Amino acid sequence: MNKIKNAIRTIPDFPIDGIMFRDVTTLYSNSEAMKEVIKLTCDYWRNEGLTSIAGIEARGFITGSIIANQLSLPFVPIRKKGKLPYDTLSQEYELEYGKATIEIHSDAINRNDNVLIVDDLIATGGTALASIELVKKLGANVKGCTFIIDLPELKGKEKIEEIGIKVQTLCSFEGH
Ligand code: AMP
């Protein structure tokens, strides 16, 4: 786990003052640390009866697609509004300032699929909770969520666990 945490670079005051940006590009370029991310994640979820992996744009696409491939499961992208070309379902959610919308292809997940949602980091949980809603709207089950990084002060992980969904995180950082 330390190998993973040590490979993540922190950029203070990006993109705005007061945010400690946890930069996973240095982790993604470290093949040894990435092998550990993929192994820990696949070992944790392998026997959970998953049928689909949904990755959140953009950093969730990278780990999500490797995990899907390792588990021989389909990968499904959850994208920002206006990027997906076919019929979509949308979900709006609150940001610290303003709102955002994410989308999924309406045929990407089947009713009764067992889905794992993947992103690099959980902060307030807004993005992950909106993704959970999208998957549920398609009639599928959210088996769990996995993130490389938890920011426990922002309580996103707690919010997801409170609605009965299992959450895996691989390391955590104090602060925002
Ligand atoms: P939230 O919806 O508040 O849980 O925020 C999670 C999303 O915002 C993830 O897709 C993260 O990539 C990004 N994010 C939020 N806070 C940070 C941070 N301090 N460093 C890097 N990415 C962040």
Image: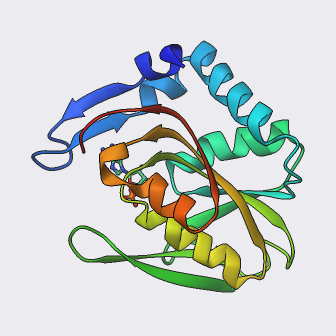
In the rendered view of the protein, which quadrant contains the C terminus?
top left
Percent position (x, y) of residue 59?
Answer: 51, 46
Query: Does 31 appear above or below 76?
Result: above
Relative placement, left or right, of 92 versus 52 is left
Q: Which residue is drawn at the image coordinates 42% and 16% (left, top)?
A: 6
Q: Residue furthest left?
A: 17
Percent position (x, y) of residue 48?
Answer: 84, 49
Q: What sort of colour scheme is used for the picture? A: rainbow
Query: Does 96 appear above or below 118?
Result: below
In the rendered view of the protein, which quadrant contains the N terminus?
top right
- Quadrant housing residue 62: top right
Q: Which residue is drawn at the image coordinates 63% and 40% (left, top)?
A: 63
Instruction: State the residue in front, 172 or 4.
Output: 172
Relative placement, left or right, of 124 versus 168 is left
Percent position (x, y) of residue 19?
Answer: 19, 45
Instruction: State the residue in front, 111 or 61.
Output: 111
Query: Does 67 appear above or below 107?
Result: above
Q: Is residue 32 in view?
A: yes
Percent position (x, y) of residue 98?
Answer: 24, 77
Q: Is residue 86 in view?
A: no
- Quadrant housing residue 86: bottom right
Q: Which residue is drawn at the image coordinates 53% and 28% (left, top)?
A: 28
- Quadrant housing residue 79: bottom right
Total count of labels = 0
Query: Does 66 appear above or below 82?
Result: above
